[in-house]
Image (cartoon, rainbow, N blue to C red):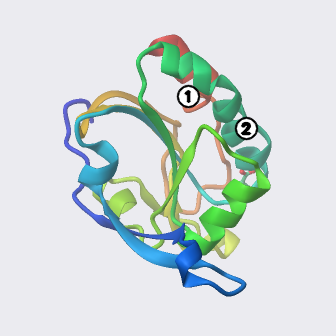
Amino acid sequence: MIGRQVPDVTFKTRVRDDSVGGPNPFRWEDKTSSDYFGGKKVVVFSLPGAFTPTCSTYQLPDFEKLAPEFKAKGVDDIYCISVNDAFVMNQWAKSQNLQNIQVIPDGSGKFTRGMDMLVDKDNLGFGHRSWRYAALIEDGKVTKWFEEPGRTDNCADDPYGESSPQNVLAQI
Ligand code: BEZ
């Protein structure tokens, strides 16, 4: 995985635009892999689903809390990716009061598939989702890789440790 270029995909995001007016002033905005990864040093963590317990209680809030320490190590941005649509990801970010982490909706799973991390979670009624991993990515190239062990379809467990912010921080 180290040295690999991230897949070139277009993400369908929803951004606030007060000129839209009305009770839901958001519009679609396409963002590409190069928008997110080009010319920057970023940490990405990808997880099985917005609002799921481990992700909401530990992984996302802990990345949020430790963000200043990542920045002190020269990380420009921290991204949370999930195979969920932009509406879900935005509501999750809002509910977590995120200030330091940007969520990226990979609703169709194209980025996750391109990273070879798309797994079947039909055992939970989830369809296809991301295996849990994190990575340091510099100008679109993976320079550090943190994948949870045992990647498999319909996995009965949800291992969490390798991709924790504490572990990533200690190793970058
Ligand atoms: C969790 O984050 O705890 C979780 C993730 C996927 C499925 C079920 C639970």
Q: Position of residue 139 (x, y in %)?
A: 23, 35
Up-down relation of residue 64 to residue 170 (above or below): below
Q: Residue at x 63, y 20 (%)?
A: 166
Up-down relation of residue 40 to residue 87 (above or below): above
Quadrant of residue 22 within the rendered picture: bottom right
Q: Nearer the viewer, residue 13 or 88?
A: 13
Q: Residue furthest front?
A: 19
Quadrant of residue 2 within the rendered picture: top left
- Say whether mark 1 is within 8 Å of ligand 1: no
Q: Nearer the viewer, residue 83 or 124?
A: 83
**Image quadrant where one finds the N terminus:** top left
- Secondary element at image label 2: helix
Amino acid type of disc 2?
Answer: Pro
Q: Residue furthest bottom?
A: 22
Q: Earlier in the sequence, mark 1 or mark 2?
A: 2
Q: Position of residue 103 (x, y in %)?
A: 54, 53
Work out how far the residue at label 1 is from the one at label 2, CA to CA, in angstroms: 16 Å
- Secondary element at image label 1: loop
**Image quadrant where one finds the C terminus:** top left
Q: Nearer the viewer, residue 7 or 88?
A: 88
Up-down relation of residue 42 to residue 98 (above or below): above
Q: Residue at x 52, y 36 (%)?
A: 149
Q: Which mark is residue 61?
A: 2
Q: Residue at x 58, y 16 (%)?
A: 69
Ligand 1 rendered quadrant? bottom right
Q: Position of residue 88 (x, y in %)?
A: 64, 70
- Residue 93 placement, left or right of 102: right
Q: Position of residue 138 (x, y in %)?
A: 27, 30
CB atoms of marks 1 and 2 within 8 Å: no
Q: Nearer the viewer, residue 148 or 65?
A: 65
Q: Which mark is residue 162?
A: 1
